[in-house]
Image (tube, rainbow, N blue to C red):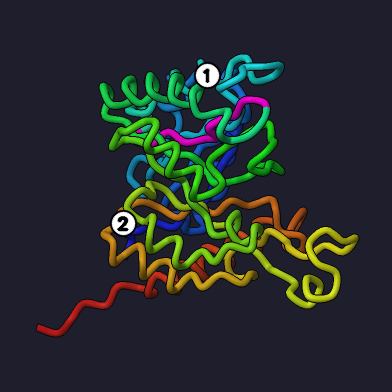
Amino acid sequence: MNNIRIGTLVNGSTAASVIPQIMPHGFESFGLTFWQTTQGTDLSELAKRVREQLAGSDIVISTLGIFGNPLTGAGKNEDTLASWERLIDAADAFGTDLVTGFTGRMPGSIDASMAKFGEVFGELAKRAEARGVRLAFENCDMGGTWGNGDWNIAHNPTAWEKMFNTVQADNIGLQWEPCHQMVSLIDPIPQLRKWVGKIFNVHGKDVTIAWDVIREYGIHGPREFVWHRTPGFGDSNWTDIISILRQAGYKGSIDIEGWHDPVYRDELEMTGQVHGLNYLKRCRGGDFIPNPV
């Protein structure tokens, strides 16, 4: 059943100490993430330690992620572009072919970011292709809109069309999750059917939408109307999501993005994540049962 693996995200800087602690819970993949920079991490040594820890198991490193703004390189993002390059070069040592993150964005509208996106990721896509690596962009808006934002342009399907027309490469795609679309009140199911061929990795994060609050106060009032959730506690139909992925021949992973749930947090974080893990495994179909012969 694990041609679609169910895993979780782990901070790259602490991965070597965290992974052995959570391996027994039944995760099938780990995505390693870095915030803005990989400086301070010996990627070769980390890859060696992680591969040793996973040896003898069927667990894989699904992705390496760098989340910052490689287009401006401003402030704490000054190393983000170089970190994309380092992770592309290091991917094979971790046993993965996928590097992910934010696109970054220039000041102003998404349209104003397209030229720089093409310049930066046109080169990164070539570097990655030469090493057999794919690149995928998370669909998180990070508080941005079409007109303004500081982190990412890859949060709207119109932007995806512009991005993939600007850099026409088969090895660039999406790191998709229903959460970020539902926060914008986009129905994720028809979007997934349309874009599934460009989805290289899925983040396991869900949403609870308070439609009663929206109907009474709208989305610009004082009341919260949406919460990020661990899968199994939100509104997404993960059975449909996994069925659509299977029908399209998806062979990647669904990696839970934890540390967002407003209820299963703090001392309940891993309780929630393991519930999400087991829930997604059930949505995947449960244990494999061979047919009679």
Q: Specify whether 148 is left or right of 290.
A: right
The residue identified by callout 1 is 81
Quadrant of the image containing the C terminus:
bottom left
Would you say residue 243 is visible in this rendering?
yes
**Could you say which is closer to the camera, residue 279 or residue 132?**
132
The foreground one among 250 and 6 is 250
The kind of secondary structure element at disc 2 is: loop
Would you say residue 17 is visible in this rendering? Answer: no
x%, y% of residue 230? Answer: 63, 61
Taking the image as shown, residue 243 lies to the left or right of residue 228, namely left
Q: Write the start and end of the magenta stretch as one range.
A: 95-107
Three-letter code for the amino acid on which mark 2 is drawn: Tyr
Picture residue at 74% right of the left edge, 57% below the top: 265
Q: Residue at x 39, y 41 (%)?
A: 173
Q: CA distance from mark 2 to mark 1?
A: 29 Å
Q: Secondary structure at mark 1?
A: helix
Compared to residue 209, the image places residue 16 above or below, namely above
Q: From this view, report whether residue 279 is shown above or below residue 128.
A: below
Q: Earlier in the sequence, mark 2 or mark 1?
A: 1
Q: Position of residue 48 (x, y in %)?
A: 41, 26
Q: Residue at x 66, y 62 (%)?
A: 229
Is residue 109 covered in magenta? Answer: no
- Mark 1 packing: few (<14 Cα in 10 Å), some, or many (20+)? many
- Image quadrant occupied by the N terminus: bottom left
Circle 2 is placed at which residue position?
250
**Mark 2 near mark 1, Cβ–Cβ under 8 Å?**
no
| Placement of 215 over or under 163, stated as above or below | below
Q: Horizontal and vertical percent for residue 27?
A: 47, 55
